[in-house]
Amino acid sequence: MTLNQLTAHEAINLIKKKRITAYEAMQDIFTQIDKVDNLIKAFLVINREEALKQAKEIDKKVKNGEKLPPLAGVAVAIKDIIATRGTETTCGSKILKGFYPPYNATVINSLREAGAIIIGKTNMDEFAMGSSNENSAFGPTYNPWDLERVPGGSSGGSAAAVAADEAFFALGTDTGGSIRLPASFCGMVGLKPTYGRVSRYGLIAYASSLDQVGTITKDVTDSALVMKVISGHDYKDSTSASLEVPDYLKSCQEGIEGLKIGVPKEYFIEGIDPEVKDAIDKTLKLFERLGAKIEEISLPHTEYALPAYYLIATAEASSNLARYDGVQYGYRTENCEDLSSIYKRTRSEGFGNEVKRRIMLGTYALSSGYYDAYYLKAQKVRTLIKEDFDKAFSKYDILITPTSPTPAFKLKEKIADPLTMYLTDIYTLPINLAGVPAISLNCGYNKNNLPIGLQIIGKHFSEETILRAAFNFEQNNSVEKKKPSMKPAKHKEAKK
Amino acid sequence: MKEEVVIGLEIHIQLMTKAKMFCHCSTDYIGKEPNTNTCPVCLGLPGSLPVLNKKVLEFAIRTAVALNCEINQVSKFHRKNYFYPDLPKGYQISQYDLPLGRNGYMEIFLPKSQERRRIGVTRVHIEEDAGKLVHEGDIASSSYSLVDYNRCGIPLAEIVTEPDFRSPEEARIFLVQLRSMVQHLEVCDGNMEEGSLRCDANISLRDAKSTTLGTKVEIKNMNSFKAVKKALQFEVDRQKMLLTEGIEIIQETRHWDEAKNVTVSMRSKEEAHDYRYFPEPNLLPLKVDLKMTDEIRRNLPELPEARRERFINNYQIPEYDAEILTSTKALGDFYEKAASLYSNSKVISNWIMGELIRYLNENKVGIEDSPISPEKLVGMLKLIDDGIVSGKMAKGIFEKMFKNGKDASKIVKESGITQITDKNELFEVIDTVIKENPRSVEDFNEGKEKALHYLVGQVMRYTKGRAKPDFVFNAIKQRINKTIR
C-alpha cells in the first residue's frame, strides 16, 4: 500500500506522529498522478514544485516540535471554479483560459491556514453546468471505476482525483448536485453544506442563490475534518451565516438510536435502477438495526424542482456570466470591428454549447413580459419545495434517498439530449432549492462494479446530524471497501 | 392652444462616504492614475462579492428624510443588466421596485414670482456608479477606447422628481437648491462639473387645460445648471414648433450638444433596453427600522431653508442676501465665520456678494479655495473702521489680497499707502489746490456745485487717493467760506 491510498485523517495522524513525512506522502501522490492521470484526466493544472516545497515546510515544523494545524501536510485538489491566486483558474472554459486570479477564495485561505497543500486544479463541466464532466472545454474526465464511463459532474475531476488516490481530499462545488452526483458515481463521500455555511467569496458564480463549496473525501471522518476548517462566517460574503461552527468530528461519532428517518416516496418512482433501489433498501434495513425509526413520507412538490431549477439557475447564470465579455481578462476574439462584435464573437467563440444554451434560457426567463411567468413563478415554487422540507423536518431528523436514479453512465450516452442529462439530477436538485445540507456516500456496487450512492438530507445547519448518520452507516455497513480498477470495463490495456 | 411645459428631473448624486458602496476602496478617485483605485469587488472579477457599506445607507436615508420621503422599512437591491465596457460585471447593482424612499417633496422658492412651489420626489434609491470610458478622438470615429474603473462602485443616490416643473428656469432653480441641500446635509459636494451631481430631464408639452401628459422626450448630457436650462429651453422651442406645424413628437432620448447649443436625437444608437431586473441574490434585503430613521431625522444638520431664516433673523440681513449666502454650504460657512468676527453683518454680506463673488467667478475659484479667508476679510474691514484706509482704497487692497493671499495690513504696510489722517497735511494740500484753481472757487461761489466736486477730485489726485473724500469735501467748503468771509 502506498501513502496516497490513506485517508486524510490517517495521513495527518501519521505525519503528526512522525511515522511518515509529509514529503514522502506528497511524493506518493505525484507518483500516482504520473501513473494514472493520463487515463483519468482529473487535473487541469498541477503545482508540483510548490506542493513539494510546502510539504518540506510542514516536515520542518514537525521536526521543530511545533503545533500542527488540523490538515497539516495533506494534498488537496481544488475544482477549477475556485479562485487561487497566481494559479490559472478557467472554470473548465476557453473564455477564462489564461485568467490568473489576483486573490484567493476564502476557502483557499482557510485550507492554507490549516496546513493543507494545494496540488492542483481539477477538471469540471464548463462553469459548473453539467452532470457528467463532458462539458469541459478541455476534454472529459474518466471514471476510475470504468474508464468508459463518466465520473459525474460538474465536480467530476475532484471526485475522480480522490477516488483514484491522486489527492487525499478535494473541494468541489454543488449548485444542483455537482458534488453529490460525482461523489456517488466515484464511490466517494460528497457533502454539500447548508447554503450560507461556507463562504462563497472566490467561488466563481454560476447560480448565486444555489452555489455552495463542499467536500469530496474518502470517508466521513475526513468530511467532518475538512468541514470544520472551511465552514464559518465570512464578512466578504453577505450571504454567509453568522453561526458557530460545531465540532463536527466529535459529534459524528455519537450513535443514532432513536433517529427519525423519512423516506420520500417521490424519489422511488419509475426510472430508478432496480439495483439502486435494492442497495437503498439494504441501507434502510441497516439504519433500522442501528436503532433508527424509518417512515415513508411525501415531498409533494418534488416533480417541480427540475423546471424551477432550470429557470432560477439559468436566470442567475445569464447575469453572472455577463462579465465574460473579452474586455478586461480572459479570451477575446481576434476578429472584431466594433464593440458589438467584440461581445458577440468573444462569447460565441469562448463559451461551449451547454453554457450558451443556459444563458439563452436564463435571459429569456428574465426578459420583459416573461419574468412573472417564469422566474418569479419558479421562485414561488421554490418556496413550496422548501416548505415541503420544513414540514418533513418538523417530524424527522433526516431524509434518505438515492443520490441518483442510476450509477455512472457511459461517455456520450446522454450528451445528445440535454433534457435526458438534466434528469440525472432529479434527486439532488430539490436540496439546493431548499438550501438544506446533504451528503452522498457509497452504499454498494452494481453488478458492473459501479458504486451506488446514498443521499442523507438534513434540515438547515444540521451538518452534525447528517455526518453522524453517515458515520454510523459507514462504520457498520457490510459494503466491501475496495479501490477502483482504473480500467475500462472490457479490461483494455491502459495506454501509458 | 395654450401650451404647458411639463418637466421632470432624474438626478444622480455621488455620496461622500469614505469608502465605495460595496468594497473598501476609497471614494477619492478624482485625479488618480487610471485603474489604481480598484479591487476585485469593484472590478467585478470572477468570484468577487459585494458587501454593503453601511454609511451609504445612512447618507441615503439622510437625503430621503430631508426630501420628506416615506422610508421603506424593507428595501431590496436589484440587478440592472446591460453590456457596456465601463460596467465590469455586465450589471449594475441598483434598486427597482422597493427603493429606499418614496413620495417625498422639496419646496423651492421662485424669486421672480415670490412663489413657493412644492416639487414632488417620486423616489430616492441607491446604486453603484460605473467606470469611465475615454475615446481616442471622438466617439463616432475613434479606433479605440480606454476604460478606467476607478469610479466603479462609487455610491450614488438617484432622486427622481414628479413632472412638476413648468419651465426650464424652475428646473434650474430646483437644481441650485437641491445642490445646496445635499451640501448642507454633508452627503454630496454637488459639483456638476466634476460629475458628483448629474442630471437628466424628461420634457413634454400639453394643452394647459389637459391633465394627460404629452409625448415625453428624455434629455441627457447636460453638464451644468446653465446647460440644463438651455437644453430644456431648446426643447420647449423645438417641440412648440413641431406642434405648430402639426408634426408628431417622437418619444426618444436626445443628447444636449453644448458646442452647437442643440439637442440631437440618439434614436439610431438606441436599442430598446430590457434590463431584466431581478433581485440581487448576493445581498440581503435592507431593513431600515423606524428607530434608525427617527434618529437620522433628529440629527439632520441645518438645512438651507432653516439657515436662510436664521441668517435673516440673527444677522438682520434681507431675504435676497440670505438666499445668495445659503446657495452653497461653503458660502454660508464663510459668511458665518466672518460674521462671528465682526459686528456689522450687512457690510460683510455686501463685500461677499459684491467683490468676493466677482473675483471668485472671474478666476473660476470656489469659495473653499478663496485666497481671502473670513479672517482676512474682517481684517480689512477693521482697517476701514480705524480710518487707516478709505472704503475706496479698500477695493484696491481687496484685489491685491485676492491675487497674492496676503492680509490687508501687510499690503498696506508694504505699499506705504495709508489714508492721510493728519489734518494739517490735508489742509496743506487743500490750500494748494484752492490757490491753483481760482476759477473753480469762483464757480462754486456762483452756486456751481460741480466745481466743488472738481476741487475734491484734485485733492484726491494730489494725495493719490489717500485722502478721505467726505472730509476733503467738507474741508474745502469750510476753507472757501472762510476765505470769502
Image (cartoon, grey):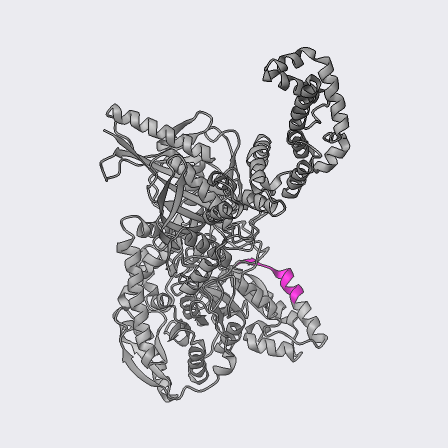
Q: What secondary structure do most residues of the magenta stretch adopt?
A: helix
Vertical comparison of A276 with A339: above or below: below
Q: Is residue A425 left or right of residue A252?
A: left
Q: Can residue A84 be seen at all in this image of the molecule?
A: yes
Q: Residue furthest front?
A: B485
The location of residue A211, given as percent across then percent down, is 43, 62
| A51 drawn magenta | yes
The answer to which of A464 and B307 lies nearer the viewer is: B307
Q: Is residue B464 left or right of residue B325?
A: right
| A485 drawn magenta | no
* Residue A373 picture quarter: bottom left
Q: Can residue B85 be seen at all in this image of the molecule?
A: no
Quarter of the figure with the N terminus of chain B = top left
**Magenta residues (range):** A44-54
The location of residue A124, given as percent across then percent down, is 46, 59
Vertical comparison of B185 with B284: above or below: above
Tell me which residue sits at (61%, 72%) in the image.
A72
Tell me which residue sits at (42%, 73%) in the image.
A439
* Residue A8 picture quarter: bottom right
The location of residue B11, given as percent across then percent down, is 42, 43
The answer to which of B4 and A141 lies nearer the viewer is: B4
Quarter of the figure with the C terminus of chain B = top right
The answer to which of B86 and B195 lies nearer the viewer is: B195
Q: Is residue B104 left or right of residue B384?
A: left
Q: Residue furthest top?
A: B439
The location of residue A154, given as percent across then percent down, is 43, 61
Vertical comparison of B102 with B263: above or below: below
Vertical comparison of A85 with B222: above or below: below
Q: How many marks?
A: 0
The answer to which of A342 and B115 lies nearer the viewer is: B115
